[in-house]
Image (cartoon, rainbow, N blue to C red):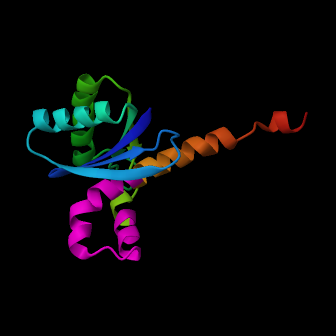
Amino acid sequence: MRLMALDIGDRRIGVAVSDPSKTLATSLQVVRRRSDEADVSAIASLVEEYDVEKIIVGHPLQMDGTAGEQARRVEAYAERLREAVRVPIILRDEGFSTVRAREMMIEAGTKQKDRRTRIDAVAAAVILQDYLDSLREEKARVPWEETTR
């Protein structure tokens, strides 16, 4: 089973998946937005194809941590998706994921044309990798009491 992350925009949805061990995130594809029904159907197909057990959705919070208009649109879309795919969906602050994705692609020497077509999927991979890393960090923590026994 894998995890999936989505970077949901008004025109495109970036999709990334983890490896089965839930260690590494990989950008998968960009779904061009057409209609909610078509978009949800496309994501649902990927959930089934990649045996996804949980979806992490990038939540575009404002700098002060509040939900603006775009965050509310993402929340509404995530709820519609939840009804269709029947797997848990977690909203996670996307924290400059697109900026980080663009920087990574520039450092990797990706051509500008290719960056435009892949940026949303790479941003989804950034969101997912951050989530996977946080899971590993939680597992690595040993309660202080256990270390003193």
Relative vertical location of residue 139 with respect to residue 16 in this rendering, above or below: above
Q: Does the magenta stretch include residue 121?
A: yes
Residue at position x 83%, y 33% in the image:
146
In magenta, the rendered stretch is: 100-125
Quadrant containing the C terminus in the rendered view: top right
Q: Residue furthest left?
A: 34
**Which quadrant holds residue 123?**
bottom left
Q: Can residue 43 be seen in this view?
A: yes
Inspect this view and state whether residue 64 appears.
Answer: no
Where's the N terminus, which quadrant? Answer: top left
Q: Is 6 on the left-hand or right-hand side of 80?
A: right
- Camera-side residue: 83 or 72? 83
Residue 117 shown in magenta: yes
- Taking the spot 43% from the left edge, 44% from the top edge, the residue there is 18
The x and y percentages for residue 127 are 41, 50
Q: How far across and how far down the image is residue 138, in percent?
A: 63, 40
Q: Residue at x 19, y 34 (%)?
A: 40
State the residue at coordinates (22%, 36%): 77
